[in-house]
Amino acid sequence: MRSIFLVALLAIFGLSSCGSIAPEAPDTVVDELPIPEQEESSINIPIKIDLRPYLSMTEKALPKSFKDNFEQCDGVSYSYKFDRSPIEFKGTGTELNFEVDGKYLLKLNYCPECTSLFNDKGNCIIPRVYASCGVGEPMRKVTVGYTTTFSITPDFKFKSNTALKKFETPDACEITVFKYDATSLLRKEVSKVLKDLEDDIDKQIASIDIRSSIEDAWKSLSDPLSMNGYGYLMLTPTSISLGKVRFDGKEAMVDLHLTAKPKVVSAAPSNTSAVTLPKLSSFKNSDGFDISLDIISNYDSLSAIFTREIKGQKVMIKNNEVIFDQVKVHGANKNQLNIEVTFSGKKKGVLYLTGTPMFDAEKQIISFPDLQFDLRTKSALLKSAKWLFSDKITEMMRTSSTFDLKPQMAEMKKMLEEQLNTSIAEGVKLKASVQSLLLTGIYPARDKLILRVSSKGTLKLFM
């Protein structure tokens, strides 16, 4: 944009040196064309959560050995011990599966008939029959498997449901001496213990803190991000939703979806209060981000930029030196811009130009095909420099005010990507890839210039 006006302003090098030029300023009309409402942007951020530290904590917190006994006079009495190996967790799809290899020993005794004549607890009339599995020999093997399904509650906490899905005993324990299936007994008793294990696993998973990380992400995306000379990016998220939890090995993933109305402003807001994390909305599935971004700049800042570029520039016109001193940009009627140019040298004066920025979205080229001197400036120049209005000069001005925006968009794309690749909090990182950044519209208003930009890319959050 700066180059557009620089070239356009230098095009008035035909300025007559005969007398001062001080035309009246053009009127800045308040009647503005309506600016199309900015579309709501969609931002989908896959969150990747490394579950290894949490699963390791869960594994260490769970007991590794279980034992119990049951004594009665009539029938079968028993005692058992069950030792488990480390739990191997593996997530697939929407489920977290894990298996536990274990080994057990089982001691049993059987009394066909008892009497309570001499003892309230009873005495076995016939000598007890004793048997065992895994005693005096290697302990018997057993494999159990669990499946855990996850959901996220409205207050951003993990909720899980763990259920026993597999119970295999390759070394069956069958007591032939009194025809007893000890494997069924073992399954029944160990299943009770494993039910407690399920509850412990669910409690450990519920303790995983994802709310604070999401709050950090929400705050970070709500804060102004410096664009290094282009202003400050305000993503301004308005709603948040979460998709289903899915797994890949020991990593959990969930899609965080935001709606937003992003904009780039020339100055950071003076008062930036903390934005409260809203309640979860219904999930909207999308891929990456597709945002409509408004770049808003007031004319004072644009005037300062243009002045910085042109101040001190000199041209020689018929042996008369013209020095450009200051530029002021104003909004005009019907999406036009008024440009006030102060110059000095042998003569001093002010010039006003008016033009409508036209934009070719496909080529990303901006031009001012109707750029011309304001009527009052034209009237003042006609009295002293009619030759400035030749077809040759007019055509040159219009040709010189054409500007290719692709290099600027590429630079802004790079800066946007750099700002979005950031560490949000300790152990929480945001990774971005901006695939495209294209200007889609230019809307001059009375006191600001709005450049509407479309950007697509991907964002990922690692925890």
Image (tube, rainbow, N blue to C red):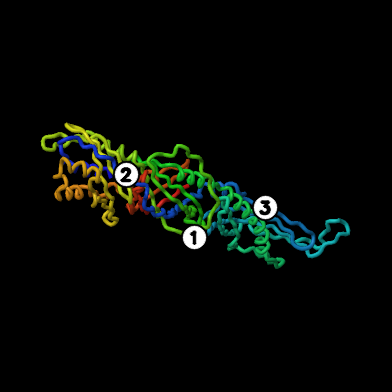
Q: Position of residue 38 (x, y in %)?
A: 41, 53
Q: Position of residue 8 (x, y in %)?
A: 22, 44
**In front of the other: 303 or 83:** 303
Residue bearing the label numbered 2: 27
Front disc: 3 or 2: 2
Calculate the distance from the C-alpha at mark 1 to the C-alpha at mark 2: 65 Å
The structure residue drawn at horizontal position 26% and vertical position 55%, both measured from the top left corner, is 363
**Spot occupied by residue 433 in the image (x, y as percentages of width and height):** 37, 50
> Among all residues in the image, which is located at the extreme left?
319
Mark 2 secondary-structure assignment? loop
Q: Are marks 1 and 2 in contact (CB under 8 Å)?
A: no
Foreground disc of the pair 1, 2: 2
The disc labelled 3 sits on which kind of residue? Lys
Whether residues under marks 1 and 3 lie with C-beta atoms below 8 angstroms apart, the answer is: no
Q: Which residue is mark 3?
A: 67
Residue pictured at 81% horizontal, 64% vertical? 113
Q: Quadrant of residue 103?
A: bottom right
Specify whether 239 is left or right of 361.
right
- Asked if residue 303 can be seen in this view, the reply is yes
Tell me which amino acid carries mark 2.
Asp
Q: Earlier in the sequence, mark 3 or mark 2?
A: 2
Residue with the mark numbered 1: 93
What residue is shown at x 23% (from left), y 37% (from top)? 22
- Name the side, left or right, on which 149 lies relative to 390: right
Image quarter hosting the N terminus = top left
